Amino acid sequence: MLLVLAMLVPAAAADVFWFGPGLPIQIVIASLSALLAESVMLALRREPLQPSLGDGSALVTAALLAFALPPLAPWWVAACGSAFAIVFAKHLFGGLGRNLFNPAMAGFALLLLTFPAEMSRWSMPIVVASHHLGFTDTLTTIFTGVPPVAWDAISSATPLDAVHSGLKTGATLQEVLARTSTAHSASIWSSLGILLGGLGLLGLRIIRWPSPVSMLAAVVVSAGLLNAIDPGTYPGVLFHLTSGATLLGAFFIACDPVTTAASHRGRLWFGAGVGLLTVVIRSWTAYPDGIAFAVLIMNLFVPLIDRLTVPRIYGHAR
Amino acid sequence: MEVTIATGRQRGVRLIGAAQRSAASAPSAASAPPQLALSLALPDGSSLVPVVRIGEYVRLGQVVAWSPDCEGTPLHASVSGQVSAIELRDAIGMSARMPAIVIDNDGRDERDPGLIPVADYTLRSAEELLARIEAGGIVGLGGAAFPTHLKLAPTPSTPVETLVINGVECEPGIQCDDMLMRYRAESMLFGAQVMLHIVGAGRCVIAIEADKPEAIAATRTAVKAAGDARLSVAIVPTYYPAGGERQLIEFLFGTQVPAGGLPRDVGVVCQNVGTAAAIATLIRTGEPLVSRLVTVTGLGVAFPRTLEVRLGTPLSHLIEECGGYTPDITRLIAGGMMMGVALPHDALAVAKTTHCVIAATAADLVPRGPAMPCIRCGDCAEACPSHLLPQELYRHAVEEDDAGLARFGITDCIECGCCDAVCPSQLPLVSVFGAARRQLQVNTVTTERRDLARQRFNAHTQRLAVEQAERQRRLKERRPAGRKDE
Ligand code: SF4
Ligand code: SF4
């Protein structure tokens, strides 16, 4: 579990470089909230605090949630999301290993539905922002909810947001992409960080290849198909792969052992479903990014997938 | 000791530093102890019937017990001397005390005059040779101790194409097969040829693990010297449980033995290298199975080694032969690191199934933390050689859901312990599965009995009803008849 956290470091570094020190602060807030929620729930369930508190699973949930939050979101956003993830998505389902939904994604979905305004105030990449928030400014913004300058000066749409809303205003995809190119390069760097960490996880055999490979393959195929049909409306494969939480989803979320299918074959189906749904949600719904909902929907299908993909036992006929 | 999941096509685990290697010198014969105890226990929990009396003088190789219902093969005296007792004793791997014949060794090793070699086996019929093998008390020496004559017996519907001589140690750390191939390859091949003659197979594959270069070299040389085109050597990657019959067949031929079936169903018969050598001894000298190779290993014994040990030798004597215990011995195990059983004391005797004794220290054992919840990581499923989903089996075992256990194939679990060894949550999977399997058997038997009782009861009620109806019919018939009479 702690190695999973370590593998998030490259991506976190890229994020801090492009968007300032918001992410680490969010991670700390989310972690504290998660640990508190975990302790309270363990106490309520009359279970010993150790070893559950020390197994690092709550910290991983918190860190993944923090990655999905806007870096300057108010502190209670991270705190609420994290607590919800631990209390509702994890412990009410029976604790570690029994949860149906990925806790981090359940927390994120709740936040997206309840605090849409706070959840859409994404930071502008430092290089283009007219005002640069230092550590203390960031801290004050997160804790008071009021930035030292106008929000407009420091926030901007994410590339996915830009495409999503830009197309509605009648701009062509190429214009929108040009406008958001700096934000997109920031997101490419974070994606590279995630990729590095993800390959590390694969190399250390902490995660297995089926879910990420099938998820990315599904994204490539479905996005590629749409782009081939109508290049003016649907962005290309590379854009899908490097924006939003695609890679984070592939390597850190779809691979969560608890909420994915049991067998390799089942995991291939699970990953493919997540990838396909992500592109569907991005293309045709009100939400710019679809990873969280795609994962949650596929979580629901895991029992079914498991039932249909029981491996053939040695010596039994196919 | 460290465990990792085997990579590649094979399912199983790799064990790094599993017990320490026993010394690489030729296996010497352990001295015969002053007193031996030949356990009459059979693997299925039944026991042989003694044919000698207390006080009787027995010679080396003389039958001392046999199985009237042919469940097991006869047992022979492994020394000459006087039978001093026939009593219940603890036996390795048995929960209850089992009868044993205790012999006071007179040290003279006087051979039973009835032991005669077979001059030219190629002139003998399969039946005759099988009868010799049965009378010679020969069983599978890989650990399962299944009677060899039964495994070799001809079945016309399933001809044997290939004989596999299994030189893959059943568990890491054991060295009997390695030692045998290094120093007695010629004898092993002779045994293989005898078996080829019996089953009428056209080829024989000797399977050896890749990490045993000396055994491979020695066997190859012997194959060349034998000049028999039917013999060939196959190298098998080192992983556990590559030595399992079904796993080995899958690796060698790419076919799986059908569930509930035998290797014969795919044209294969497997025999352990030790069994082959024992058959060679029997045919060449007439001597039945009275000794076997035993690996004594672990950091808890001074000089680990593989020894030729007479059946019935107490483990304490064996440990003495290896220089005694070291101070930090913590556990005595019979069998390997994966499937071995912890022993209560060392007064137990070597039996035909005893291939390894581990005097383990803390460093030999896999440290086990407290069990944590299953996180469904799937490592266990990846390691399971039977392609089961141990995480699902575990869930259903905990819930005592027999139907779920059956659906996920609990009866196909070979209790190899791979899942257990790789589980990051340290769940006691294999012991839970063992218990669940036995419970399921009990439950099935109870259900069967209940069904049988219900059937009998129904039949009984029905019979009563039929009889009643019959009686009434007759009564009715008689009455009008009577009336007529009136
Ligand atoms: S290895 Fe252990 S924790 Fe992982 S799925 Fe299997 S039983 Fe669960
Ligand atoms: S003990 Fe049973 S379930 Fe576990 S790996 Fe071996 S065969 Fe599979």
Image (cartoon, coloured by chain):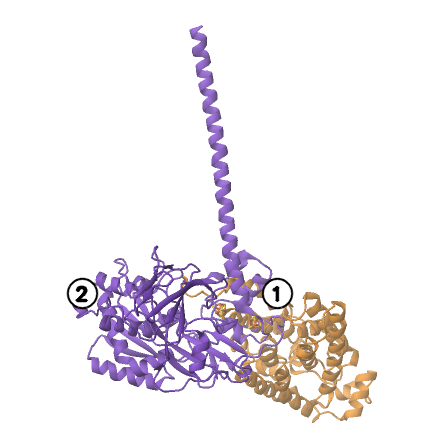
What residue is shown at x 70% (from left), y 89% (from top)? Answer: A19
Quadrant in which residue B362 is drawn: bottom right
Q: In the figure, the purple chain has which letter?
A: B
Q: Chain of mark 2?
A: B
Residue B294 in the image: x percent, y percent?
39, 77
- Residue denoted by label 1: A300
Q: Chain of mark 1?
A: A
> In this rendering, is residue A143 above or below A114?
below
SS of the residue under disc 2: loop
Circles 1 and 2 on the same chain? no
What residue is shown at x 73% (from left), y 90% (from top)? Answer: A21
What residue is shown at x 26% (from left), y 60% (from top)? Answer: B154
Residue B323 in the image: x percent, y percent?
45, 85
- Residue denoted by label 2: B124
Question: Identity of the amino acid at label 1?
Answer: Leu
The quarter of the picture where the N terminus of chain A appears is bottom right
SS of the residue under disc 1: helix
The hue of chain A in the figure is orange
